[in-house]
Amino acid sequence: MQAIRFIFQLFFIELILYHAVLFSLGESYKNCESYCPFGAVETFALFAQSGKFPCAVNELNYSIFAGVLLLTVFFKRAFCSWICPLGAVNELITRVRSYFIKYKPLAENIMKTLYSVKYILLAVILIATYRNYDLVFRPYCPYFTAFGLHGHTTVVLSYFILANALLATLFIKMGFCRTLCPFGAFLNVFNMKTVFKIYRDEGACVKCKLCDGACLAEIKVSESAKIENAGCTMCLSCVSACARNGALKVGL
């Protein structure tokens, strides 16, 4: 299953970079920004007010956003672990770092504080975009900087922010995704009571805690009958790591 997920991640990274190259060569009007569902979140208030697509977003952003929202309602934040290119980069950094030095979970009160940062960023971005009628976050967006091939609003500060966003992952497992990503914060609203989730068969579980170590979101899988934690991205790393076949499974 993890091999299949890796193929999905690689496909979407290549897709985004392919269109970024075409855009930079002037052969397409679509770049990585055209495939960003967060653009719809940023501009929804403006769209609702005017009935027109504001800024650089269009029907493609909103269509992808609708698809991601539907995916989240059914399969939790699977977008983050199966599709998002920046999520894939964060996972790569996490796995390479874990190979050399294992992460030590931070204190729960510290993590709660860090979790709140992405919600603050989301609020600031939404308010600033509405007031300025422009995608004010674009020059500072790590996704646009990483996959936009030096887009027209990319400056030195853009690369500095990207570097620091990725550096966060060296200290916290999936650091950017868990503490800084505003789109992840938005999806968390729909990520609790989803249709499908991971269940643990308490009778079959041998309490080996391999699932806890494999979880990219540091969820205590071994202590839950079903995973409803908003941080779950349905990456299925815990299911793949489970020592007892059938102790963890995806179900309704």
Image: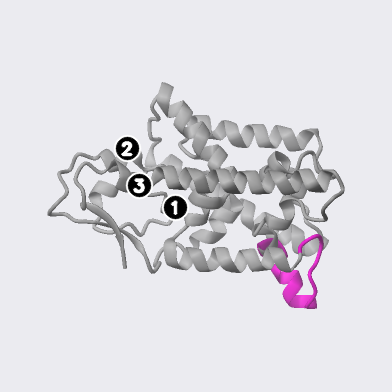
Disc number at residue 219?
3
Point out the stretch of residues depicted in magenta: 41-57
Which residue is the site of mark 2? 213
- Residue at the spot x=17%, y=48% of the render? 205
- Residue at the spot x=50%, y=38% of the render? 91
Q: Is residue 51 magenta?
A: yes
**Is residue 248 toward the left or the right of residue 59 in the image?**
left
Q: Quadrant of the C terminus?
A: bottom left
- Residue at the spot x=21%, y=48% of the render? 245
Q: Is residue 219 magenta?
A: no
Tell me the distance, in whole angstroms, between the alpha carbons under discs 1 and 3.
11 Å
Count of marks, rendered view: 3
Tell me the distance, in whole angstroms, between the alpha carbons under discs 2 and 1.
15 Å
Looking at numbered disc 1 in the image, what kind of residue is underneath it?
Answer: Thr
Q: Residue 154's quadrant in the figure?
A: top right
Where residue 176 appears, as percent x and y from the top left, is 55, 41
From the viewer's side, name the closer residue of 210 and 244. 244
Height in image: 140 above or below 68?
above
